[in-house]
Amino acid sequence: MPPGKKLTDRATTTPLTADSSCEQAFCHIIISCCQAIDRQLTVFLETENESGPHKARVALRRLTTALDAFSPILHRKQAAQVRVAAKRLFRTLGEIRDADVFLASQRGEKKALGDKVLALRRKTRKALRDSKAVGFAPGVLKLCRSGQIFRSDRRSQILRAAPVAVLARLVLQEAWADAHRYGPDPGQMGEEARHDFRKDLKTLRYLAEFFAGFWPGPAHQDFRSRMQGLQDGLGVLNDMANARQRGRAGDPDAEADALRKAARIWAAISEEAPFWAPPEQPATGEAPPADKDGAD
């Protein structure tokens, strides 16, 4: 039996705890992501529900976040192949998502724009069917269940069996440090930097959601609520930037309000110790060094 098979088979029914092994935690998260990807691709391929592409992209981003977080125990080549396929699918669905957002923001030309979006949806569905995109999630699950996605050297086997809480704290602190590198005020960032900031905040938020149960209490719920508000504000700014690229002027007042909201929330979040930090650890953006060496 492959070394990861028994743990993988238990992952859908065993609750994730701080004492769960890294391998079990990875499988638990990946199974959840793959189920969501499969479900939302079906929504997009079989209905006109606008939520399908968006939710499928969220699940794909969560999956790639997990791949990065658990990279010390993953086979480099296999994980890289999954990541490339996930990003390709993410970009394909992104065209639909951007078109839907743009259409919703327009007051005139709805009919003409709606026809273009419908044509794009049909074209994208055909491309996904031709590329057998529905096989992506089952393929990832197969890699997990066979154990092929894991490194098999002795050191990696020890890491795979180790409690996940240590890895969780490490990757959360790394993501926290990455977010701090952009500075304290989103209003002082250029559009490209702010877009990257928004993506790194998503990574931080998804990691916090993966491991929230390890640090129970109201601090996580407060963190998650404020992160959602921050991302909502940054999302408005991102949609406006996309509209400008399409030659459509945005609302300066709405943009200014979104910037103020984002700056206020980020200032509040960044000045506090994160919920996963030990009581004695100050709220800094410094991450402890990561040891990610190891053979495939």
Image (tube, helix red, strand yellow):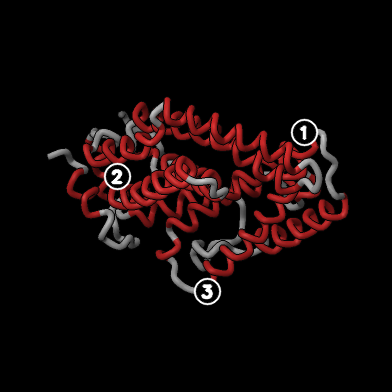
* Circle 1 crowding by C-alpha within 10 Å: few under 14, some 14–19, many from 20: few
Residue holding disc 3: 218
Nearer to us in this view, 222 or 58: 58
Residue beneath the point at 51% across and 62% down: 277
In primary-sequence order, the first of circles 1 and 3 is 3
Tag 2: residue type?
Leu
Answer left or right for 110 relative to 287.
Answer: right
Tag 1: residue type?
Gln
Q: Say above or below: 96 vs 252.
A: above
Residue 117 coordinates in the image, percent (x, y):
64, 37
Q: CA distance from mark 2 to mark 3?
A: 31 Å
* Circle 2 crowding by C-alpha within 10 Å: few under 14, some 14–19, many from 20: some
Q: Secondary structure at mark 3?
A: helix
Q: Secondary structure at mark 2?
A: helix
Residue 212 in sight in this render? yes
**Residue reaching furthest to the left:** 1
Q: CA distance from mark 1 to mark 3?
A: 41 Å
Answer left or right for 271 relative to 60.
Answer: right
Residue beneath the point at 27% across and 54% down: 11
Residue holding disc 1: 245
Answer left or right for 77 relative to 97.
Answer: left
Q: Secondary structure at mark 1?
A: helix
Nearer to us in this view, 225 or 109: 109
Residue 288 in sight in this render? no
Q: CA distance from mark 1 to mark 2?
A: 46 Å
